[in-house]
Image (cartoon, rainbow, N blue to C red):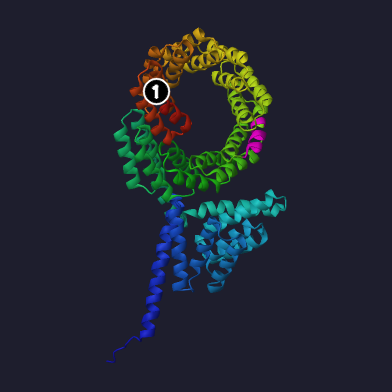
Amino acid sequence: MTEITLTPKFTHIMALENNAQGLLEEARVAHENYLIRQQSTDLEHAIECYIDAIKADPSKPESYYRLASLLLIKGQISVDGALEQCKTAVSLEPNNTNAHIYTGYFQCLNGNYDEAEKEFSLAISNSGKNSARPRLFMSKVLLSKIKSHNSSAKDVMKFLYYLLSGSMMIMWDCPSIKMFCKFLANDFSVFSYKTLGETFEKMKLFPSALEAYSKGLEKTSQGNLFYQKMGDLSLECNNVDASIEFFKKAHELNPADRDVLIKLATISQTYFPDNTDETIDYYNSLLEFGVDLDKIYYELGHLYLNKSDKIHAVTAFKLAQELSPENPYYNNSLAYAYVKAELYDDAIEYYQTAIKLNPDSEWTSIVCHALGAIYAEIKNNFDAAEATFNAGSLLDPNNVDIRLSLGDLYMNQNDLDKAIKTYCDAIAVDPENYLTYAKTGLALWEKDYIEESIVAFHKSIDLNPDFEIAQNNLGVVYLDGIGDPKSSLEYFKKAIDVNPNYTLAYFNLARAYQTIGDKALAAEYFQMTMDLNKITEELSEKDIRKRLYELFE
């Protein structure tokens, strides 16, 4: 008997065919999983395998029309591109039922109902008793024609015929029945584990609920769903680290799930402020959905501010404001970003817009405070600052901070009477605010109301003994106002205890010892003042040296 030997070329061809068949089968499984689970990882895997199958064996029509459907879902090709793929499949196997079904489906998407009808007719004639699917597709085409008012009574009869016959013949369509059973089994398992977990949650049996969701993750194909349930549960139990990890896994399975991205962005922004770049990536991914863009840009603006990225912050807030120009909060945040970028004229414009929109009197009063500060500190426009601060006070009479800023404005203009009145108004609003008494004490001191100044500073210290400025200023009043250097020592020392880097307090303490006549301690503290002033640069070094030298003249 003669032994048949396979040539290397024939062996190579068989290997390629086997490889192509294996890739095609792997693609079918991934495609089926995608239809059941709707997870992007399955979609990507199926596309990759179909492409590899075509490379291994370009003669298999199934790879073309199935790949076309997935690429269309992903948005990588148009309907016309999908039709071109189907034409290739039909040319390879003219009697392939599925090739005609897919071609008809894409023609229907293009609105070519007559062409779609022809394709489904060919599919029906080629598939015999297994023609349930093309019959049902045919009924869908006819229904579309009827809805478009481009039909006849004959089309209505044909629609009813194909709908009824397709519905009856579905029992002989094994692929459809198989897929339906898989869907049914998976849905039942998902429902069971999901319901069990939710029941445990309601009973506050959180470990049992987590176990039920974990089992659901293991037993079903809905990983995205159960990872989300586990993430929500972990967050409810204040296990933030576990929560964000579960949501990350859900996102890996389906990057197109917007709800998961929102949760990842929110959790990362709220609980992980150091992970700013990661949070920005989540929000940038959310932009791709084209939903609530103004809100996303608004959050991105704040994240860029956290990074001190002023340019991107301005850009993000500007995009939010352009999408919703009547939103006062967007205008306010854009103005604040302009302040950070030192673009004060632009900041003024958007602060003014936010004030005009005035969603809430208390909030708008705060915006008036910010705008008034620009007028006062940057533009030196005291009239505009005064008007803005007064407007803010009218909007919110309980806003102590804006009254203090107005008082500071009067102090800078040396209008001590108005300053004292304004600070006293602030005291009337909040009698327990130590800062109001300290500022009032300073204004009274400048007005030479010594006794009243002492009372105000003592009240500030009673409310907050650790407010070093009030301690220092009270010491100055005793030293320079009353001429009681011994009493002043206590307050200067307390100021230094609270803030060991308070250069002015060291200087005043040295002056007090100088007045008492203790030259050694005065020299010591003048020297300490000089050393510390090299760092803080609060005082004139020339003045310190002069006082130090005067001790020994």
Q: Which residues are magenta?
A: 343-352
Determine which quarter of the picture holds residue 407: top right
Which residue is drawn at the image coordinates 55% and 58% (left, top)? 72
> Which residue carries the number 1 mark?
510
Horizontal and vertical percent position of residue 12: 38, 80
Is 3 covered by the magenta stretch?
A: no
Q: Quick check: 525 left or right of 290? A: left
Depth check, front residue: 181 or 112:
112
Q: In the figure, 122 relative to 395: above or below?
A: below
Q: In the figure, 195 relative to 36: above or below?
A: above
* Residue type indicated by callout 1: Ala
Q: Residue reaching furthest top? A: 451
**Magenta residues: mostly which secondary structure?**
helix
Horizontal and vertical percent position of residue 474: 45, 15
Horizontal and vertical percent position of residue 221: 38, 49
Is 350 covered by the magenta stretch?
A: yes
| Quarter of the figure with the C terminus | top left
Depth check, front residue: 62 or 127:
62
Determine which quarter of the picture holds residue 2: bottom left
Q: Residue reaching furthest front? A: 553
> Does residue 502 appear in the picture of this structure?
no
- Label 1 Cα crowd, 10 Å radius (few <14 / some 14-19 / many 20+): many
Q: Residue reaching furthest left? A: 1
Horizontal and vertical percent position of residue 426: 55, 14
| Quarter of the figure with the N terminus | bottom left
Which residue is drawn at the image coordinates 54% and 40% (left, top)? 301
How many numbered marks appear? 1
Q: Circle 1 — which element?
A: helix
> Does residue 179 appear in the picture of this structure?
yes
Q: In the figure, 30 relative to 458: above or below?
A: below
